[in-house]
Image (cartoon, coloured by chain):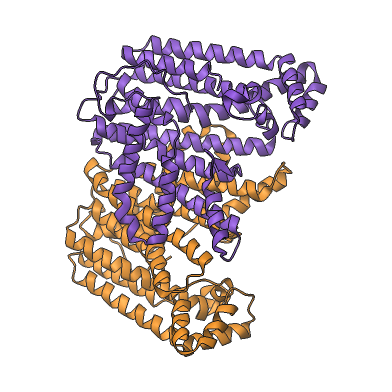
Chain colours: A purple, B orange
Amino acid sequence: MLSAGTGTETPNCSGPLSAVPGTAAFATAVEQALTGYFATRAEAVTALGPVFVEAVGALESFVLRGGKRTRPGFAWMGWLGAGGDPAGDRAAAVLQACAALELVQACALIHDDIIDCSRTRRRFPTVHVDFEQRHRHQGWAGDSAHYGESVAILLGDLALSWADDMVHSSGLDPAALGRFAPVWAGMRTEVLGGQLLDVHGEASGDESVAAALRINRYKTAAYTVERPLHLGAALADAEASLVAAYRTYGTDIGIAFQLRDDLLGVFGNPEVTGKPSGDDLREGKRTVLVAEALQRAAADNPAAGDRLRTAIGTDLSDEQVGELRELLIELGAVDAVETRIAELTDQGLAAIEASSATPEAKDRLEAMALAATRRAA
Amino acid sequence: MLSAGTGTETPNCSGPLSAVPGTAAFATAVEQALTGYFATRAEAVTALGPVFVEAVGALESFVLRGGKRTRPGFAWMGWLGAGGDPAGDRAAAVLQACAALELVQACALIHDDIIDCSRTRRRFPTVHVDFEQRHRHQGWAGDSAHYGESVAILLGDLALSWADDMVHSSGLDPAALGRFAPVWAGMRTEVLGGQLLDVHGEASGDESVAAALRINRYKTAAYTVERPLHLGAALADAEASLVAAYRTYGTDIGIAFQLRDDLLGVFGNPEVTGKPSGDDLREGKRTVLVAEALQRAAADNPAAGDRLRTAIGTDLSDEQVGELRELLIELGAVDAVETRIAELTDQGLAAIEASSATPEAKDRLEAMALAATRRAA
């Protein structure tokens, strides 16, 4: 999710545990941990027979197919910033636990793709579409789409179970596991709760800024930045003030990241973002940006609100997208969101600056915050 | 799943931890542990707002709505039989960990009901149907059925996450948690793998006895009897020979239980089972019974195999059900299944009898085995 590193790091030690989050080397280290974990389960999987072996193979391919490993990256930074030693004898276990976040993420993506009826992800068929296609190619009995969803539900469940199992077989000492567990519990509840609020908000047509911000807070900020940093801090047994600083930074920068994403979804340059401009408007996403516009329209310009409400979620022409952009600017929604991003970024950076995080971690978290909130793609 | 106790117990100590698995008192003790766990999560749930509070309330109602608490019962028996002391200071934590099996089961049922398109469970709407109805009653936008499935996917995920969280907040000491974790990992992988094999077998039309037995082994026996006993043994730090005896008993009795269930689904007395007679044939369930019949027909009587194959899964009259019953008997499938049940039960009982389990546990596990394999409902 967050952008890659700036490329200015010159690590003076070698090996995967010296890799800096956001770089390709770090992603590789996470992927090695995941591959290693799948290997430890191979015997148990094989005992269930070739059908299960094939399905788990599909899950492994999905997990290893790219992604920026953002959540393990923040967890690892949280640990380093609290004094964790990447050359120490606990580092390998910590990295293993951080990498397990990618299995939670695999479940979230696989199940979200069913919920959102998404057909592709990272240019491959989504898991439910993959198994729908396998069913159809085999000419099997029954409904191919339902078969695909059934397999994808079970593979998402497996990823969620294995996330826990990976943590508990990582080699962390019992005290570290004990500190990790309540944060891990909070994180999984928050992301599932945030997804549930999102599903509910879309169905019920909740247009409030508060509802959009709450979804953003739990589905994105807590899950992607705040709790991963918190997990890293817990593993390092960080002092309470550093945990508080991480959480402030994580919440603020996580929300600001999503607000930037909302703006790019409407105003982004397709050549830079890689997505057709205005796609969020065509999909009818209930963003804070749209909620801000509707709230302002309700007070000043009800006709503009009706125009926006009826247009989003329809198959808009480029010209219509252009008109809606103008409307969002005129209503002051864009300025409001930009102001919010700037304030959140300032708050988050101030919290980290005043914290007891290591100087290297401060620099890195500042760079990550600016990359996340000032990016163009 | 397994039948309730015989009612002959007269426990000479009081309190929930003295309750005998299979009795109402034990079910109440498990439900108290679950209610207590939900209470510990209330603050975190409330932070996400009333929509999430309502959804978690629906999950709690589902979890507390009956069931025989079979899996916690076997886990608790496994612990007692290995010398666990129900009056000791570890008992409450052990019961808490055993009760967490009901949250795994909640996920399995909620997701299975989506996969099987089941509309009711325990005479209530299934979770996806419940939320489908809420959507419809509110007159919300979008597809009600898809909304219901989306919420049910997320609530199943939440139950699966909370199962782990409940174990790790149970108060078990680190050594016990360390012994528990790999068994817990095996169990969740096996039940999800078994479900996946079931979904695959139904789609691909795999008719082999081996495939039906394998699904039975992992989806029912390992998940319901073998691994729960193993979990209890792990918590008690049981010697390897007792673990092996438990696992033999659990596998054999678990499979025999399912085979009895298959026979009752076709030959059971509706007044005793509470289900229309022959319902498994109308639903087209791919049981070991049907697989045995098809395998025998392939050798001796291909026409009978074709008749069976085309009839099951259709809306059969009572007369047609009667004809299929005759066919299953004539082909020798019923005798074969009865023989298998008898052999498995003997093997399972012999393993327990020869083990180092406590005399009380041996008696109880023998009673549970006979209740499971010789029942009429």
Q: Is residue B122 above or below residue B264?
A: above
Q: Residue at x 64, y 35 (%)?
A: A201
Left or right relative to A269: residue B60: left
Residue B263 visible? The answer is: no
| Position of residue A77 in the picture relative to residue B47 (left or right) | left
Tell me which corner region of the image, top left, top right, bottom left or bottom right, holds residue B36.
Answer: top left
Q: Position of residue A279 (x, y in %)?
A: 66, 30
The residue sitting at the front extreme is A271
Residue B34 shows in the view: yes
Nearer-the-camera pick, A101 or B149:
A101
Quadrant in which residue A177 is drawn: top left
Please state if B294 lies on the left or on the right of B230 as rendered. Answer: right
| Residue located at (33% from left, 48% from top) | B97
Q: What residue do we see at 25% from left, 51% from top? A: B235
Nearest to the observer: residue A320 or residue A354: A320
Q: Is residue A232 above or below residue A101?
A: above
Q: Residue at x 42, y 14 (%)?
A: A366
Q: Is residue A168 left or right of residue A138?
A: left
Residue A22 picture location, percent across and down: 40, 24
Quarter of the image where the N terminus of chain B is located: bottom left
Is B131 rendered above or below residue A267? Answer: below
Q: Position of residue A87 (x, y in %)?
A: 22, 25
- Residue A17 at x, y = what percent? 27, 28
